[in-house]
Image: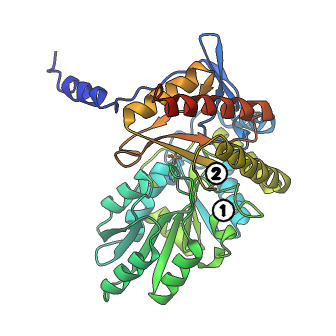
Amino acid sequence: MTDDIFSAGLEDLAARGLRRAATAFDGGSARTVTLDGRTLLLFCSNDYFGLSHDPRIIAAVKEGLDRYGFGSGGSRLISGTRTPHAELERAIASFLGAEAALLFGTGFSANSGVIPAIAEKGDVIFADKLNHASMVDGCRLSRAEFVRYPHCDMAALEKMLKKAGSVRTRWIITDGLFSMDGDMAPLDEICSLAKKHDARVYVDDAHAFGVLGKNGRGTPELFGVERDIDILMGTLGKAAGGMGAFAAGKKSTADWLLNKARSFIFSTAMPPAVAAGNLKAVEILGNYRTERNTFMQITEAFYDRIKTAGFAISYKSYIIPLVIGSAGDALAAAKLLWDDGIFVQAIRPPAVPEGTSRLRLTLSLAHTEQDREAVIQCLTKYLGARHKGTGP
Ligand SMILES: Cc1ncc(COP(=O)(O)O)c(C=O)c1O
């Protein structure tokens, strides 16, 4: 028996309301989860269009399983590449209007592999303070100098760019749509600063790929700067409903990453059937103009209602952060919703800064009007209790 070296740390996390557990739901759909015979409305997934349960995608995965088997059996550069991987890379590039795209197993592995491959000793990375953890880790793994600017503060970013002096390459690295705050990086301003100060731009559009912009090309399309982004990273685990990620840009960029990104080179390729499912999802997203418009209308209407319910929040996106404060209060608020049949996760440090624990509510086209109404009713009840001093 080895010594128990983690129990004290776990107890400490629990005392501070920061210990986590993964609830294993036993079923559900894109709009619900079930546990022990109880069905809860799911309002914290990233499955914005409900594609995780789309029958067309499920059929494509089944066909892929029959044709290619379960696993890929190897890394992409040894023996793991199959036709669906190559087709998916071409489909993503074409969807985005990019020259090429390279697949990764997850968004985390994309960011942590791509960033060290593009920024080396002698380069400087300028990163938004609220960037996703996987980008932070990618920046830490890189041998470039790594500086962080206050969230979306363009004046501070410009000051840092000026101060950097003569360096080999400057990279500005940012989320397109911030995952815990639901706001967007001002990509138009970022791209002008990049031009002015000779910097390159890397955008992680995990939460916007397929959703934002007329054609679903994400925040660069929304801000009209698609041509000014050097690398667009996106995931297939959110609006596409599956799993995986990509980095898209010039053909030479994809080739460089194929040769240099360690998380691409030294990792088993995603199962071909998953690639086939992702391929179908990208095809579906390509035809989702009406659905994107409907989703935006639903989102705007939801903000109106949530503000009427008493939450002081300005419009952000389909990611809606209801900041509560302490980790304990956020957990208690999530429990109140849970008791009323709604599953919304409490988001706590280190995912968000200390004192800003929150309920991170996400909308999905899979929800019905009644589902959204149930959430509003529940939040109204929660706010009422809070005002009376009887709730968290
Ligand atoms: C902004 C952002 N980047 C990257 C990731 C990681 O993506 P994946 O879940 O595919 O590893 C996430 C997901 O949580 C994210 O929100």
Where residue 47 appears, x then y in whole percent? 66, 41
- The image shows residue 47, relative to residue 110, as above or below, that is above
Taking 288 as reference, is 196 left or right? left
- The image shows residue 367, relative to residue 110, as above or below, that is above
Q: Secondary structure at mark 2?
A: helix
Where residue 247 appears, x then y in whole percent? 55, 61
Which labelled disc corresponds to residue 85?
2
Residue at far left of view: 3
Residue type highlighted by circle 2: His
Q: Residue at x 54, y 46 (%)?
A: 321
Image quarter of residue 368:
top right
Q: 345 or 327: which is nearer to us?
A: 327
Taking 152 as reference, is 289 left or right? right
Residue at far right of view: 290
Q: Quadrant of the N terminus?
A: top left
Does residue 240 appear anywhere in the picture?
A: no
Which labelled disc corresponds to residue 246?
none
Q: Residue at x 73, y 60 (%)?
A: 216
Give the Cα distance between marks 2 and 1. Answer: 22 Å
Crowd around label 2: few <14 · some 14–19 · many ≥20 (10 Å)? many
Which labelled disc corresponds to residue 218?
1
Q: 223 or 25: which is nearer to us?
A: 223
Residue type highlighted by circle 1: Gly
Q: Secondary structure at mark 1?
A: loop
Where residue 119 appears, x then y in whole percent? 38, 71
